[in-house]
Amino acid sequence: MRLDLDTFREISDSLTRNRSRSFLTGFGVFWGVFMLLFLLGGGRGLKHSLMMNFEGFANNTTVLFSGLTSMPSHGFKKGRAWNLTYTDVDRLKVMMPELDVVTPVISNYGVSAVYGDRQISCSEKGVYADYASIETPKLKYGRYINESDVLQERKVCVIGRRIYETLFPEGGDPCGTRIKVGSVYFQVVGVDFNSSGISINGTVSSSVTVPASVARKVFSGSRGDAVDLICVTAKEGIMLSNHEDRLRSIIARRHSFDQNDRQALSILYTEEMFALMDNMLRGVNILILLIGIGTILAGAIGVSNIMMVTVNERTVEIGIRRAIGATPRDILSQIIMESISLTSVAGMLGIVFSVLVLAVMDLANPDAGFQVTIWNAILVALMLTVLGVLAGLAPASRAMQIKPVDAMRDE
């Protein structure tokens, strides 16, 4: 069958002969394609939004924090309170070469940050310079806490976004100004716009981050050497959960509690959280594919059924074509081309509509990334062609079996 203007005009006349039927049949394919691409684009935007919530947070971080003992050990009764210390930080660095970063965090809550006549409730967070490897700062202005700040006990700070917008509503670079946090004045050296959904001892946007050496003197009070948390990351390729027994043993031996006491030392593995999220998103993607492909297949089956009805209605026409010299191959090509045309036109409209809807959603939320990739669109277009051929095979086979004599007798 030749692909010329007459052929396409003939296909168009055949499909528009019963406009309502062709429209309703094509709508099934249109809706299936739209749903598949819309769900793929929406799932991509959902994944991107979730990943943005964890942006800047090391996905191999492990957080250690102390609790009450639940077992008697070393002559102590259960229910004993204890604290992690700076000594534990040093011991972990020496005794566990698998670790990359070991850094403490100490916090002070319920304080106010004041600048001029403006103030805001916030929390203070004392850290070392290497804490930037745990929660990577997204600096709008200035710099982060460095080693010199810690060693020289400088009274400097990095403020979060919410604090910056409250104390400096006029905007601009606040670095160099001094704000009062609690009862102590700190010089602002940076503004951190990190918006990670994971927070350690308070959200970054509502925290004032200061050198741990200063925090230890300013707001540790009677806690002495105690720290609130110890954050660690493992070297590349190492899962710290596989070394938990050694980790617990090092801490338990130092503080005289049973290393099997899970309540005495709590360990949070963020790698497990990220793995759980990845599995959840993978399951969502599989579900999206099943729903979308199933809907398209249902539309293709509808096309096949309608084409079968069309063949039955055109028995005489097909018989006459056969009588004047049309070969079975010509009949086969005609029916399959009509099937491909119907599925392709409906499918392309579905692609265009899904792209437009996702574009509107992307404009409303530019950071989410509600888009379909060009490869998704190409794969769907190829799938539509294949489905068009498959949907037309059964009707075309039926049309090839029509004999001119039988067609005239049917008339």
Image: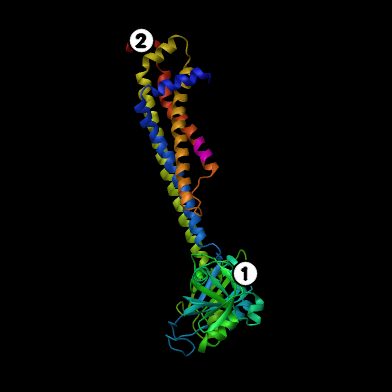
Q: Is residue 72 left or right of residue 92?
A: left
Taking the magenta stretch, the answer to whether it contains residue 224 is no
Q: Quadrant of residue 88?
A: bottom right
Q: From mark 2 to mark 1, how far is it between C-alphas? A: 89 Å
Between disc 2 and disc 1, the foreground one is 1
Which residue: 49% across, 88% down? Answer: 74
**Tag 2: amino acid:** Met
Q: Please report contact status of discs 2 and 1: CB closer than 8 Å, yes or no.
A: no
Give the crowd class for mark 1: few <14, some 14-19, many >=20 residues within 10 Å. some
What secondary structure is marked by label 1?
Answer: strand
Which residue: 56% across, 71% down? Answer: 243
Residue 140 percent across, percent down from the top left: 58, 65
Quadrant including the C terminus: top left
Along the line of sight, which residue is nearer the eye, 180 or 274? 180
**Range drawn in magenta:** 377-381
**Tag 1: amino acid:** Gly
